Amino acid sequence: MSLAARYTEIVMGASMQFIKSAVAAFLTMACLAGTVHAQGTAPGSEEPSLTDQLQVASPEDAARLEREIRMDWEKSGSPAMDLLLKRGKDALEAGELELAIGHLSALTDHAPDFAEGWHARAMAFYQEEEFGLALHDLEVTLALNPRHFAAIYGLGVVMESLGRDTDAYALYTRVLSLHPHHQDALEGVERLKARVNGTEI
């Protein structure tokens, strides 16, 4: 299926202008969130967060920190909600997309403030090529957790799938500002660099 055909299937009817505006708004929000976080932490007042450590980590330490961060993301505070997330992700890994979406929709209904539930469902929607629904869930994920680098990367993947190379490049670059050793984002920047060369981002 061509990118143009995929684009017309976006169920939420998001226009190109809406997508461009949404990405611009996210990038502004993300930058402001980073600034506020940095200003709100006085030197020596507390231990750096895992995401702060990730920004300056070696490749070896980055892999460990990413695992720890992802484990934190998966903690909802409720064993029942954690189980729904596990079932949804297990179904997703098995390619059972309808079942995955069912579990993850139950999770987002019952725990709407749990960012990872929205992120996991976005991955399922993306695999079904339901790009509009994936965009919505990624937007919610990032509203709840602006430093969720996996969701930022996912948003970049959707943008690239829709032919929005400049937006995708900006998002992959944002991922690297949070996680400099994110291999997929590094490859995305390298892949798109020539296409966006000379284009204002």
Image (cartoon, helix red, strand yellow):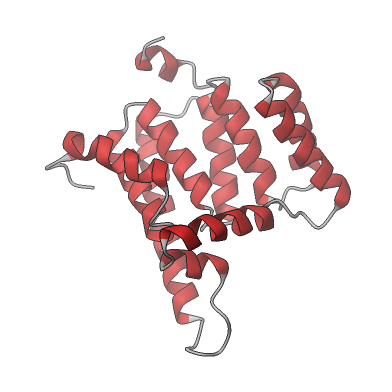
Where residue 191 sits, quadrant-wise, is top left
Q: Position of residue 111 (x, y in %)?
A: 78, 48
Question: With 3 as the anchor, is 166 left or right in this view?
Answer: left
Q: Position of residue 47 (x, y in %)?
A: 57, 81
Residue at the image point whose x is 45% and y is 80% from the top: 39
Q: Quadrant of the N terminus?
A: top left
Q: Residue furthest front?
A: 60
Question: With 134 as the anchor, is 165 left or right in this view?
Answer: left
Front-most of 55 and 100?
A: 55
Residue at the image point whose x is 55% and y is 41% from the top: 138
Question: With 87 as the anchor, is 64 left or right in this view?
Answer: left
Where residue 100 sits, quadrant-wise, is top right
Q: In the picture shown, does residue 10 fall above or below 59?
A: above
Front-most of 133 and 149?
A: 149
Residue at the image point whose x is 59% and y is 34% from the top: 122
Front-most of 20 and 168?
A: 168
Q: In the picture shown, does residue 193 fall above or below 181?
A: above
